[in-house]
Amino acid sequence: MASLDSKVPPPAVVLIMAVGMWLTARAAAAFDFAFPAHTWVAAGLVATGFLTGMTGVVTFRKARTTTNPMKPGASSLVTWGIYTLSRNPMYLGGLIMLLGWAIGLSNAVAFLFLPAYVLYINRFQIAPEERALTSLFGATYVAYQARARRWL
């Protein structure tokens, strides 16, 4: 399914997953659960995810490289800041926000969307980006892959 490679903007994937989680939670009310302070935990995770993703964007902007995930390619390899912890903090931020949303929905079925998000982003976004970065930066990027984890 290479036709999906880098075709759907990752923020749209997060939004689609969030809507799917909400619809599924409404349809599967039998899987609702009670979680004390779930609203606060959910809000904290959504905020943490947003800040994680935005830190990646700001770091890219400081490095004067593209933040457009639809056209994998870069003018420089960013390996500092948040990129020492994760090669994909923007996608990690999306996952953390979805985790917060799942907790906010308080429905066990909503959590099934989290691995679906990871699998989709790994296959259709990260893999094409890694191929492009390996082509652009060669051994330097391969060494960076050995130092920094894909997600966290």
Image: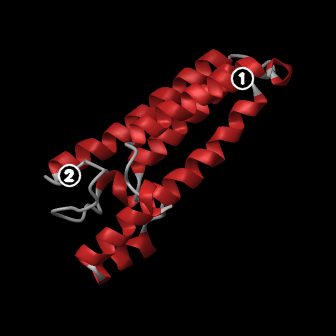
Q: Residue at x 37, y 60 (%)?
A: 84
Q: What's the distance in space between the residues labelled 1 and 2, CA to CA?
A: 36 Å
Q: Residue at x 29, y 63 (%)?
A: 79
Crowd rating for badge 1 (residues with CA inside 10 Å; few <14, some 14–19, many 20+): many
The residue indicated by pointer 2 is 66
- The colour scheme of the drawn protein is secondary structure
Q: Residue at x 47, y 39 (%)?
A: 13
Considering only vertical position in the picture, is 26 above or below 24? above
Frontmost residue, 130 versus 49: 130
Res. 3 mark: none
Q: Residue at x 26, y 61 (%)?
A: 78
Considering only vertical position in the picture, is 134 above or below 92? below
Residue 33 point in image, percent of width and height: 81, 21
Residue 136 point in image, percent of width and height: 23, 74
Considering only vertical position in the picture, is 148 above or below 43? below
| Kind of element beneath mark 2 | loop
| Kind of element beneath mark 1 | helix
Frontmost residue, 44 versus 6: 6
Residue 71, image quadrant = bottom left
Task: Specify whether residue 12 is in view.
Answer: yes
Crowd rating for badge 2 (residues with CA inside 10 Å; few <14, some 14–19, many 20+): some
Considering only vertical position in the picture, is 96 above or below 40? below
Residue 60 point in image, percent of width and height: 23, 50
Residue 112, image quadrant = top right
Frontmost residue, 98 versus 43: 98
The residue indicated by pointer 1 is 25
Instruction: Give the number of callouts.
Output: 2
Determine contact: label 1, label 2, CB under 8 Å: no
Q: Is residue 8 left or right of residue 18?
A: left
Amino acid residing under circle 1: Ala
Amino acid residing under circle 2: Thr
